[in-house]
Amino acid sequence: MTNDKHDTHNTGRSMTSDLRDVQTREFMVFGLGNEEYAIDIGNVSELRGYGIVTAIANAPPHIKGVINLRGVIVPIIDLRIKFGSNEPTYNQFTVAIILNVGGQLAGMVVDSVSNVVALTNEQLKPAPHISSDIESNYIIGVGTVDDRMLILLDVDKLIFKSEIAVLDRLAA
């Protein structure tokens, strides 16, 4: 017998179809400014406090640089800058979420991480239609928990392989 909780992790299928196919999925909730976002817990490798990052010359502003994580060089992307929020501040609540993106590790800097929530199909809504002028293909839906709305993100579309490739090229 299969436990649905374990089947919620990335199975290689489209995450949008997964929103409808699975009874319950677990998401890590994090904050950026006044908004709450969530990503599939199956993509999360670990959480780290934001620390010293080695900058890479000529990298785009949202690519903060790289860290050495137990011998693995991990690119760090500040999601606050990528999303165009106000100038980010770095404090004791700033977190780097280390993600597995297509078999490669990448870090995503956020303001804070709050918890992990299990969302049922009834709590998951498809992504709203947003103007084609705004890049939003990484938004896969909206989750509702009590009176909270969580913007659900697809990390494979959010952390572009091209960004990781830019870092690899710059670091070489």
Image (tube, grey):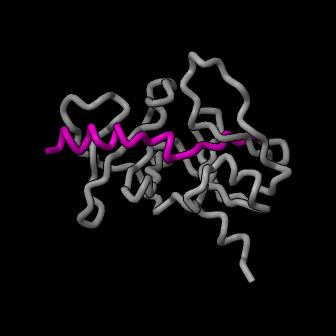
Magenta range is 149-172
- Residue 160 is inside the magenta segment: yes
Coordinates of residue 65 in the picture (x, y in percent) = 28, 41
Question: Residue 133: which quarter of the image?
Answer: top right
Question: Residue 137: which quarter of the image?
Answer: top right
Coordinates of residue 75 in the picture (x, y in percent) = 32, 47
Residue at the image point whose x is 50% and y is 41% from the top: 157
- Residue 126 is inside the magenta segment: no
How many tags in the picture?
0
Residue at the image point whose x is 46% and y is 62% from the top: 46
Assign the magenta stretch its main secondary structure: helix
Coordinates of residue 23 in the picture (x, y in percent) = 79, 62
Residue at the image point whose x is 33% and y is 36% from the top: 63
Nearest to the observer: residue 144 or residue 115: 144
Nearest to the observer: residue 88 or residue 109: 109
Q: In the shown orientation, is residue 138 left or right of residue 105? A: right
Q: Is residue 168 above or below residue 88?
A: below
